[in-house]
Amino acid sequence: MVILLGGSGYVGLAYQKLFAQLGVPFRNLARKQVDYTNTHQLAELLAESRAEFLVNAAGYTGKPNVDACESDKTACLFGNAVLPGRIQEACERAGVPWGHVSSGCIYSGERPGGGGFREDDAPNFSFRTNHCSFYSGTKALGEEVLAGAKDCFIWRLRIPFNEVDSPRNYLTKVMSYARLLEAANSLSHLDEFVRATFECWQKRVPFGTYNVTNPGHVTTREVVDLIRQSGVSTKDFQFFSDEDEFMRLAAKTPRSNCVLDTAKLRAAGVEMTEVHDAVARALQEWTRE
């Protein structure tokens, strides 16, 4: 039995779909059923249900984007930094291994020395380093809370997308925004992300932190070119002249733009599609909700 937290969210629903496809017995634990923010109640449920594994897809991202986190900092701090620690305590009490959906948005810019940011690089887009978004600051704190956690995976998601048109889908956002910011980023195909993270448990790879993004990186203009080639949208895409103009006209808080290194995940035997190919395939299979 797998226990799923945050199953009604964008990522959580993808986990529900995966478990159903695989025939994996799971329980989507809603807070109205059991208050999983209460360490004692969650630990009791894990013991009583004889759970083998827990996936935490709960957290606070803000809708329609991270700007919303600036207006509800209490909920954002609790969901991203406090809650993971409570889940850790409950899982360790019950002796249940687990995985936590984190974020690669704790980095920004280029990694010193080149290449993508690695799992052991200290976050450079956090409360401790510079003027980050509140969302990114809380996600970095969440990873600090889990430092030294036993039998725990930390899975870093980055800018999720797939073939289903949705307000949470990065490709939908690119096609809906009036103007875009040119940047190079790692992305995570949502369905590949949930499959890859669960494979970490199925294959019993070593516990720890993993960057779970599609190998390589892609620029905003490359994504636009792929959209045009697919015929999904033929709009005249407009770009901001630079990040200063973007911040002045369109954003309340700074954005993370970064590339993550995925060598550790590949070395563990978990493969994902190269990012340009994954975006192109999603556009070829584009469907409306």
Image (cartoon, rainbow, N blue to C red):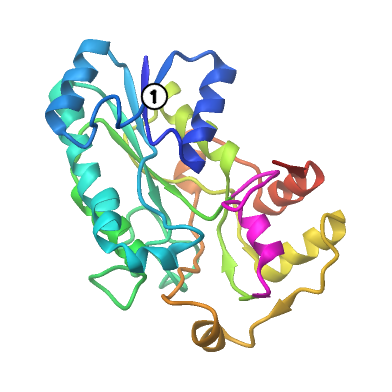
> Does residue 220 appear left or right of residue 262 in this picture?
right
Quadrant (top left/top right/bottom left/bottom right) for the C terminus: top right
Farthest-out residue, front = 32
> Does residue 159 appear left or right of residue 152 in this picture?
right
User: Label 1's element?
Assistant: loop
Which of 29 and 159 lies nearest the eye of the viewer? Answer: 29
Image location (x, y in percent) of residue 70: 35, 68
> Does residue 245 appear left or right of residue 90 in this picture?
right
Magenta stretch: includes residue 185:
no
Quadrant (top left/top right/bottom left/bottom right) for the N terminus: top left
Magenta stretch: includes residue 171:
yes
Q: Residues within 10 Å of mark 1 (few under 14, many from 20)?
A: few
* Residue 34 sits in quarter: top left
What residue is disc 1 on? 204
Please give the range of residues in magenta. Answer: 161-179
Query: Can you say whether 236 is above or below 216 in the image?
Result: below
Image location (x, y in percent) of residue 243: 54, 83
* Residue 72 sits in quarter: bottom left
Image location (x, y in percent) of residue 48: 21, 11
**Residue at horizontal 54 percent and vertical 34 percent from the top:** 14
Query: Can you say whether 197 is above or below 226 in the image?
Result: above
Which of 208 and 105 lies nearest the eye of the viewer? Answer: 105
Which of 140 and 236 lies nearest the eye of the viewer? Answer: 236
Q: Is residue 143 visible?
A: no
Image location (x, y in percent) of residue 267: 48, 39
**Residue at horizontal 22 percent and vertical 35 percent from the top:** 87
Query: Can you say whether 7 is above or below 185 in the image?
Result: above
